[in-house]
Image (cartoon, rainbow, N blue to C red):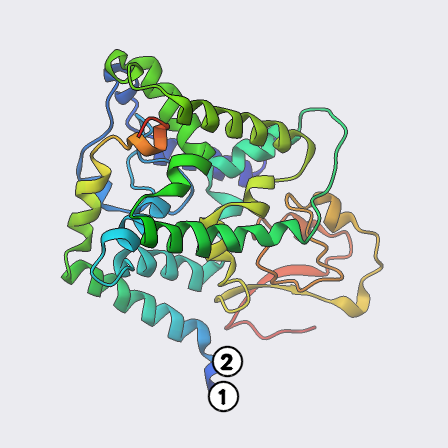
Amino acid sequence: MITKRRVSQILSVILYNAYVVGFFSGTIYQGVAKVIPCPAFNCHSCPAALFTCPIGAIQLFAAYGKYYLSFYVMGFLGIIGAIGGRVICGWACPFGLLQDLMYKIRSPKTDIPRIVEKTKYVILFGVVFFVAYYTKEPWFCKIICPAGTLEAGIPLLGLNKDLRQLIGIVLIIKIVILLFFLLWMIVSKRPFCRVVCPLGTIYGLFNKVSFFKMRLNRDSCILDRKCVRMCPVGHRIYEEDENDPRCIRCLQCSECPEGLIRLSSKTRKDSS
Amino acid sequence: MRFITKHLYKILLITALFFLIAGIIMGEHDTLFSYAIVICLNCMGIG
């Protein structure tokens, strides 16, 4: 049965990548919508992409911006974060959808140690901000980003003969990294979101303070752990902070049989 | 302090809105546009 969240994810893929003409021309969209940062993780060099990658933009301004920070991009992301926290990750991210679908492939499954998830802060502050500022190069895009390889590298190199002549060792490294993540997505829940994604990390910083928050009635919890099994990121909401930066606000845990978990707004009085 | 924690999301939202407007006034959206309409060779692994 297809859920509302799945429909939302599919619609987001279509919305962010509506310029399908790009797949026939072998070029990218160059229209006015490119002035808008994409709210989710989607490479703007995908032939079909309508919007700009915010992480690429952050690195650009970290390297060359007047204040080394893009007020425009951070303001855009801040508005979304202040309202819903990491809700885009759960409901409107193409790369999140890919991970959810890959995890459905039958295989032995393994969890990701909590300490490994701290890597995302090193990626965000170390690679995206500091390394881009220091080296004037977008090293996250150059080496790490698997979305760029999957959505831009492979399609454009397949469509554009001239670009194929520029293929070198860096592309090989990026394809290996992409394959690594694709395999990891099969055995672990949303590894990219939990360990690497700098955009999700930015949104996650807002989880504790956003307008919409998760609420859990801990006193009535019977510890059946159904919430953890349903959670796409394996968040143990019953023993950790319900507004932990890991939570992607997908609301699957709100299907708790006891009805103990819900999304609440600041204006709603808590009954628990 | 209690006022700040109670209204923090509003403070963040208003700050973000000011950031967005300030970025537009400074012309950052034009810079972003110029960057985004060019194929990112770095993203593709050939830059």
Q: Element under label 2?
A: helix
Residue B5's disc number: 2
Q: Chain of mark 2?
A: B
Q: Position of residue A73 (x, y in %)?
A: 30, 55
Q: Residue at x 75, y 60 (%)?
A: A238
Residue identifier under label 1: B1
Residue kind at label 1, given as amino acid type: Met
Foreground of the two, A91 or A239: A239
Sort mark 1 into few (<14), some (14-19) or many (20+) by Cα contacts within 10 Å. Answer: few
Dot 2 and dot 1 residues touching (CB under 8 Å)? yes
Q: Residue at x 34, y 50 (%)?
A: A132
Residue A260's disc number: none
Residue kind at label 2, given as amino acid type: Thr
Q: CA distance from mark 2 to mark 1?
A: 6 Å
For the question of whether residue A122 can be seen, the reply is yes
- The quarter holding residue A150 reads top left
Above/below status of B12 relative to A89: below
Above/below status of A208 relative to A86: below
Say left or right for A42 vs A179.
Answer: left
Sort mark 2 into few (<14), some (14-19) or many (20+) by Cα contacts within 10 Å. Answer: few
Say left or right for A94 vs A237.
Answer: left
Above/below status of A271 relative to A77: below
